[in-house]
Image (cartoon, rainbow, N blue to C red):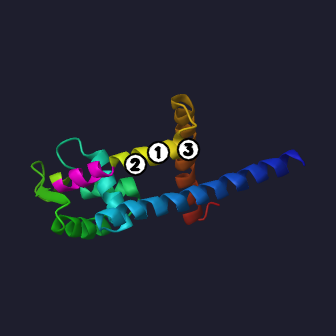
């Protein structure tokens, strides 16, 4: 097999592996969400808030940027999650036009209940990778994600 064909095969295999991983992660997120009685997008919103919140709450725009979704969708879903008592939404002390969103004690307790299952799942998924290997993979995936966004932008404006 010629070098170009091997490179194309490697790229094709990589893309299909990413498609498979994405599909499996969606199924996993859906399962976690069902355990809490919420939707998969709502689960991802909770996880994004949990990761982004530094103790002062987080803006809906920050959540939307993290998840690469429209801010209006985040607003709609956070209202539903607030009604379910998973989130608290308070006016930002820095700018009254914005809300700071944080997890409630109820949400934290529910997520904590899942922690043993989540740790077991992570062990199954990543147990064969040591910290250095996982760090290496993450650095490369970060680079590929950045370049994918650039390629998508070029495609959108007709440069590709």
Where does residue 125 sit, x and y in percent of width and height?
53, 46
The mark lying in front, picked from 3 and 2, is: 2
Drawn side of residue 139 relative to residue 113, left or right: right
Relative vertical location of residue 14 with respect to residue 54 in this rendering, above or below: below
Relative vertical location of residue 84 with respect to residue 141 in this rendering, above or below: below
Magenta residues, start to end: 106-114
Does the segment drawn in magenta span residue 127?
no
Q: Do the residues labelled 2 and 1 touch (CB within 8 Å)?
A: yes
Drawn side of residue 24 relative to residue 71, left or right: right
Q: Which of 114 and 83 is in front in this view?
A: 114
Does the segment drawn in magenta span residue 112?
yes
Residue bearing mark 2: 118
The answer to whether residue 111 of the structure is visible from this angle is yes
Where does residue 103 sit, x and y in percent of width and height?
20, 53
Where does residue 94 sit, x and y in percent of width and height?
12, 48
Please give the name of the residue rendered at 67% of the width and 51% of the height, measured from the top-left corner.
14
Please give the name of the residue rendered at 52% of the width and 47% of the height, measured from the top-left corner.
146
Neighbour class for label 3 at 10 Å: few (<14), some, many (≥20)? few
Name the element at disc 2.
helix
């Amino acid at each position: 097999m010629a070098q170009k064909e091997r490179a194309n095969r490697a790229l094709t295999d990589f893309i299909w592996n990413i498609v498979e991983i994405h599909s499996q992660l969606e199924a996993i997120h859906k399962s976690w969400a069902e355990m809490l009685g919420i939707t998969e997008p709502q689960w991802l919103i909770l996880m994004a808030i949990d990761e982004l919140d530094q103790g002062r709450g987080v803006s809906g725009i920050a959540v939307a940027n993290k998840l690469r979704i429209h801010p209006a969708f985040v607003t709609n879903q956070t209202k539903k999650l607030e009604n379910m008592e998973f989130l608290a939404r308070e006016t930002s002390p820095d700018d009254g036009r914005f809300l700071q969103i944080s997890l409630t004690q109820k949400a934290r307790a529910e997520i904590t209940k899942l922690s043993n299952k989540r740790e077991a799942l992570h062990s199954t998924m990543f147990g064969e990778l040591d910290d250095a290997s996982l760090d290496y993979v993450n650095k490369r995936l970060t680079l590929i994600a950045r370049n994918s966004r650039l390629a998508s932008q070029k495609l959108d404006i007709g440069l590709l």
